Amino acid sequence: MILTPDLDLTKGMILSTLRFKMGTVGTPKSTPKKPGGSIGTIQYLSSQGLGALELGWVRSVRISEATCESIKAAAIEYHVDLSIHGPYFINLNADKQEWPKSRKRLMDAAHFGNLAGATDVVFHPGSYFGRPANEVLNIAIPRLQDCVMELRANDNQITLRPETMGKGALLGSFEDTLLLSREIDGVEPCLDFAHLHARAGDGSMNSYAEWIKLLKTYKKELGGKAAQRIHAHLSGIEYGPKGERNHLMLNDSDFDLAGLLRALIELDCGGRILCESPEHMDEDALLIKQKMEEILQDRS
Ligand SMILES: [Zn+2]
């Protein structure tokens, strides 16, 4: 089909108002076997019209400086924004013996992530171990502050992003991540919208009105600039009274995608939305992108 100038213009308008880049956490199954690895994933996502990748360094950080260099070069060439998902075994509330190991995992992710051209490191902040949130945060804040200070002393400007977690027993409520971010320059939340919905446990946190309220709080507490660079995870999710059970494809879940996207547009938010759906996360990332473009088009 030959595009008429009118259609071209419409497309241009959509692109200029789409303030989010969409992508995946890790490598989608449909990525071709060759060249494979992170570089193959960057090339594949770009070929699909996706513009962000969160590298899943979730077991450990084992990567050479040379590999980081080539990942960075590929990301620049293919216009894909990079972030890192740090190892699962990080706990800001670890005991005194364990904390140095947790800290090293986070710092390694930040060091090699920075070399690979990533701007953000997402991590699971830890567990309450049954203690009240404020007690745990009193331990977590100075520890995380100290990490950022060391990074900045080493000329590393990467943003550390504690993720909102899907279970009530875990450090990482929306309020916890807001407080960590307010207290420490260089820390901002990773808003996992599926986890926020699942953590409520009763089907709430799933409507336009609820997302507007949450995003208004985000803007008020962290400022308009932070709302322009939101780093989000999104997928379908199955949950019970205690929260998250497992991730689902969006269309197999009760998640109100349009409600969330409308709220993000309404409050002029921007940034990245990374999809973590099982099986075909690239398809869900494209679904999110198309849905957002449709909503933008209907408004214009
Ligand atoms: Zn995560």
Image (cartoon, rainbow, N blue to C red):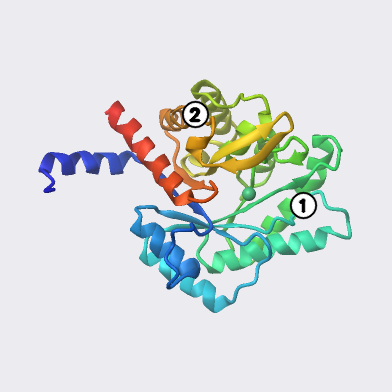
Q: Examine the rendering and report whether any part of residue 190 can be seen.
A: no
Percent position of residue 159, x then y: 58, 53
Check the picture and name the quadrant holding the C terminus. top left
Q: Residue furthest bottom?
A: 66
Instruction: Inspect the image, locate mark 2, and give the three-letter code of the amino acid beneath it.
Output: Asp
Which type of secondary structure does the marked residue at label 1 adopt? loop
User: Spatial distance from mark 2 to mark 1, Cα to Cα?
Assistant: 31 Å
Residue tagged by mark 1?
A: 91
Residue at 29% from the left image edge and 27% from the top image edge: 298
- The nearer-to-camera label among 2 and 1 is 2
Please tell me the numbered disc located at residue 146. none
Percent position of residue 161, x then y: 62, 49
Residue at 42% from the left image edge and 33% from the top image edge: 268
Q: Earlier in the sequence, mark 2 or mark 1?
A: 1
Q: Is mark 2 within 8 Å of ligand 1?
A: no
Give the class, few, some or many, for how many residues have Cα within 10 Å of label 1's Cα (few <14, many ≥20): many
Q: Examine the rendering and report whether any part of residue 167 can be seen.
A: yes
Percent position of residue 244, x then y: 67, 38
Which type of secondary structure does the marked residue at label 2 adopt? loop
Dividing the picture into quadrants, the one containing residue 99 is: bottom right
Give the class, few, some or many, for how many residues have Cα within 10 Å of label 2's Cα (few <14, many ≥20): some
Residue at 39% from the left image edge and 61% from the top image edge: 44
Residue tagged by mark 2?
A: 256
Dividing the picture into quadrants, the one containing residue 120 is: bottom right
The one of 141 and 264 positioned closer to us in this rendering = 264
Q: Residue furthest top?
A: 209
182 sits to left or right of 82:
right
Instruction: Inspect the image, locate mark 1, and give the three-letter code of the amino acid beneath it.
Output: Asn
